[in-house]
Amino acid sequence: MSSRHFEEWAGVSKTAYDTAVKELIDNGYLVLKKGKKETYDFYESGKEAIKVTNPIVKLFEEEKKDSGFEF
């Protein structure tokens, strides 16, 4: 899910989104996958907790189908 889609879906500003993502990266919760530009793994307390496929994307896709809203 792009940052723009998340911002629209969650109703947050770009600044709030960017700040939250930066904080997660700075604290080691989001770690850029080796060889990738925009794909992150999620870690909790320095240990890999979940490799996030991003469950929000699935929910977003389902809502998008139901709403008729086109991206």
Image (spheres, grey):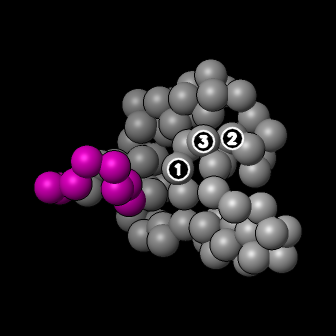
Q: Is residue 25 above or below residue 15?
A: below
Most extreme residue toward the right is 67
Instruction: Please give left or right for residue 11 compared with residue 44 in the image.
Output: right
Q: Nearer the viewer, residue 35 or 63?
A: 63
Q: Nearer the viewer, residue 50 or 10?
A: 10
Q: Disc 2 marks which amino acid?
A: Glu
**Residue occupied by mark 1:** 2
Disc 1, disc 3: CB below 8 Å?
yes
Q: Disc 3 marks which amino acid?
A: Arg
Q: Disc 1 marks which amino acid?
A: Ser
- Residue 26 in the image: state x and y as whole percent: 41, 31
Q: CA distance from mark 2 to mark 1?
A: 9 Å
| Few, some or many residues within 10 Å of mark 3 (<14, 14–19, 20+) | few
**Residue occupied by mark 3:** 4
- Residue 68 in the image: state x and y as whole percent: 80, 69
Instruction: Please give left or right for residue 41 compared with residue 7 in the image.
Output: left
Residue at 62% from the left image edge and 33% from the top image edge: 17
Residue at 25% from the left image edge and 48% from the top image edge: 37
Quarter where residue 12 is shown: top right
Most extreme residue toward the top is 15
Determine if residue 58 is in view.
yes
Please state the extent of the stretch shown in magenta in the rendering.
Answer: 34-41
Which mark is drawn over residue 7? 2
Which mark is drawn over residue 48? none
Instruction: Please give left or right for residue 2 compared with residue 58 in the image.
Output: left
Which quadrant of the figure contains the N terminus? bottom right
